[in-house]
Amino acid sequence: MFARVKDVALLLGRIGVAVVFFAHGLHKWGSGVGATADFFGQVGVPLPTIAAVFVIILEVLGSIAFVAGFLLPLIAVGYVVDMAGALLSVHALNGLTGTGGYELVLVLGLAALALGFNGGRLSLDHVLFWRKRAARAAQVGELETV
C-alpha cells in the first residue's frame, strides 16, 4: 500500500511542478519568441533567441512530458538549466525571499530534479524502460541461481 501512495505522491508532485512551468511557458509563448529573446538579452542571457526557443519548448512541451512521466531525467535537467539561468540572470540580486527573490526558482529546479530521477511507477518512463529492465534483471538473477 505504501508503494501506491508513494507513486501517487510522485505523480502529484510532477503535476504541481509541471503546471507552474507550463503557465510560465504559455506566457512566454504568448509574448512571442522575439519579446522573450529581447528580455533575455536585456538581463544578459547569452544567445537570447536560442535560449528563448529552448525555454518556450521546454516549459510547454516539456511540462506535458513531465506530467506523463516521459523522458523525466532529460526534462528535469532542462528545468534545472532553465532555473539556474533565471536565478543567475534575474533573481540572485533580490535575495532568497521577498519581491523578485529566488526561492521559487530554487524550489522548482530542485523539485524537478528530484522528481525527474524518481518519477515513480505512474510514469511512461517506468512502463517503457524500467519495468522491462527489472524483468530482464529478474531473469538474469534466476539463471544465476540455477
Image (cartoon, helix red, strand yellow):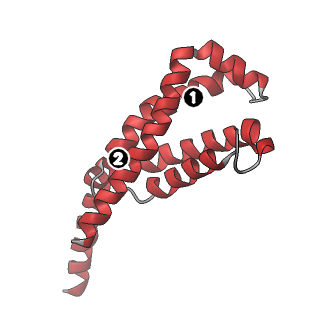
Is residue 71 visible to the viewer in this orientation of the structure? no
Q: Residue at x 44, y 36 (%)?
A: 62
Residue position for label 2 = 69
Please, what secondary structure does the residue beneath circle 2 have?
Answer: loop
Image coordinates for residue 68, horizontal then vertical, percent: 32, 42
Image coordinates for residue 100, horizontal then vertical, percent: 70, 38
Q: Is residue 114 left or right of residue 14?
A: right
Q: Earlier in the sequence, mark 2 or mark 1?
A: 1
- Give the position of the C terminus as an image quadrant: bottom left
Q: Residue at x 55, y 48 (%)?
A: 108
Q: Is residue 82 above or below residue 28?
A: below
Foreground: 135 or 101? Answer: 101
Image coordinates for residue 125, horizontal then vertical, percent: 33, 50
Q: Residue at x 78, y 22 (%)?
A: 42
Foreground: 85 or 102? Answer: 102
Q: Is residue 140 left or right of residue 104?
A: left
Image coordinates for residue 13, horizontal then vertical, percent: 40, 52
Q: Residue at x 29, y 47 (%)?
A: 124
Foreground: 128 or 6? Answer: 6
Q: Outermost residue toward the bottom?
A: 145
Q: Is residue 123 left or right of residue 115?
A: left
- Give the position of the N terminus as an image quadrant: bottom left
Q: Quadrant of residue 134?
A: bottom left
Residue position for label 1 = 54
Residue density around tag 1, few if under 14, some if 14–19, many if 20 or more, within 10 Å: some
Is residue 63 visible to the viewer in this orientation of the structure? yes
Q: Looking at numbered disc 2 in the image, what kind of residue is underneath it?
A: Gly
Residue density around tag 2, few if under 14, some if 14–19, many if 20 or more, within 10 Å: many
Q: Outermost residue toward the front?
A: 98
Please, what secondary structure does the residue beneath circle 1 have?
Answer: helix
Whole-number angstrom distance, CA of label 2 to CA of label 1: 20 Å
Q: Looking at numbered disc 1 in the image, what kind of residue is underneath it?
A: Phe
